[in-house]
Amino acid sequence: MEKTRFGSAEEIARFTSVIAGGKLAGLYWVDGIVFLYFPLTASNTAVSKELLEKRKVYWTYVGYAPMPKYMPIIETKEKMIVPVVDISADEILKGVAAWLKAQL
């Protein structure tokens, strides 16, 4: 539904830390892209039907940035520390990362 391209891994880490209210929140990394997403909950009939019948999941938001090399943490200049999980083994999210790369 909405996507934001951040200029750097530090920018998306800062955003993630702020929206999490300083609590430990993390990012995902696949094939040179670091990202976060918020799925639309299957709390209504239309979304539930798409999930069950078509195996489709909708995201209300995705934020992403280029990050050529995987790093397990990103530390911002404000000393915010955000963990990053390498999920390269997930075939579906590899497809998402390829699509996000094409948006760069």
Image: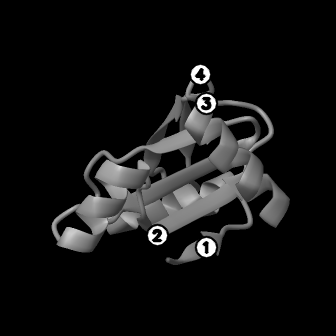
Residue nearest the viewer, comparing 80 with 62: 62
Q: Which of marks 4 and 1 is nearer the N terminus?
A: 1
- Residue 104 is at least partly visible in this image: no
Question: Disc 1 marks which residue?
Answer: 4
Q: Is mark 3 on a helix, strand or loop?
A: helix
Question: Disc 3 marks which residue?
Answer: 91
| Drawn side of residue 33 relative to residue 91, left or right | right
**For the point 58% across and 40% down, which residue is it?**
93
Amino acid type, mark 3: Glu
Q: Which of marks 2 and 3 is nearer the N terminus?
A: 2
Q: Is mark 2 on a helix, strand or loop?
A: strand
Considering every residue shown, the one lying at the far top of the view is 89
Q: Do the residues labelled 4 and 3 touch (CB within 8 Å)?
A: yes
Considering every residue shown, the one lying at the far bottom of the view is 2
- Residue 38 is at least partly visible in this image: yes
Question: Disc 2 marks which residue?
Answer: 61
Q: Position of residue 41 (x, y in %)?
A: 24, 62
**For the point 35% across and 48% down, which residue is it?**
25
Assess disc 3: are there few (<14), some (14-19) or many (≥20) residues with their C-alpha within 10 Å of its C-alpha: few
Amino acid type, mark 1: Thr
Q: Where is residue 54 in the image (x, y as percent from the top left)?
A: 42, 53
Q: Are marks 1 and 2 in contact (CB under 8 Å)?
A: yes
Q: Give the label, 2 or 3, closer to the camera.
A: 3
Q: In this view, does 86 lie above or below 100?
A: above
Question: Disc 4 marks which residue?
Answer: 89
